[in-house]
Image (tube, rainbow, N blue to C red):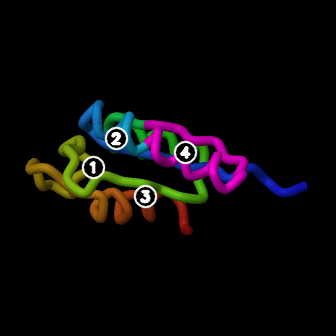
Amino acid sequence: MIPTLRIAVCDDMYGELQSLVSLTNQYLSFNSIVAEVTQFSHPDELLTTIEAESFHLYILDIVMPMDEQRADDHPEKRNGFDFRNGQRKHRDI
């Protein structure tokens, strides 16, 4: 049995998140791809989720706020690349 493709979409701006999820679903439908799309409005929510779950594909906003504890002692906004580095601490992909 082929596992269902799992996609995580994360953006801290609600309208952008909805657009990304909609476009992703349109692409999947147009190409007859079965997938589970999960949306996250904050990178810390996604980091918490991936402690127990994994995704095959991540669609990330580039500039997003992160919990100061997870931002490696940098309180300013972090980005999708920083999320990826934090994710590696949870799971080797």
Q: Which of label 4 and label 3 is nearer to you? A: 4
Q: Secondary structure at mark 4?
A: helix
Q: Specify few, some or many for label 4: CA neighbours under 10 Å numbering under 14, 14-19, or 20 or more.
A: few
Q: Which of label 1 and label 4 is nearer to you? A: 4
Furthest-bottom residue in this view: 93
Q: Which residue is mark 2?
A: 44
Mark identifier at residue 26 = 4
Q: Secondary structure at mark 3?
A: helix
Question: Could you tell me which residue is drawn at 70 percent across and 53 percent down?
Answer: 33
Calculate the distance from the C-alpha at mark 4 to the C-alpha at mark 3: 27 Å
**Within the magenta stretch, is there residue 28?**
yes
Counting residues from the N terminus, which is met first, the one under dot 2 or under dot 3?
2
Counting residues from the N terminus, which is met first, the one under dot 1 or under dot 4?
4
Question: Could you tell me which residue is drawn at 29 percent across and 40 percent down?
Answer: 16
Question: Could you tell me which residue is drawn at 60 percent across and 45 percent down?
Answer: 53
Q: Disc 1 marks which amino acid?
A: Arg
Counting residues from the N terminus, which is met first, the one under dot 4 or under dot 3?
4
Calculate the distance from the C-alpha at mark 2 to the C-alpha at mark 1: 8 Å
User: Badges 4 and 3: C-beta atoms under 8 Å apart?
Assistant: no
Q: Could you say which quadrant of the image residue 11 lies in? A: top left
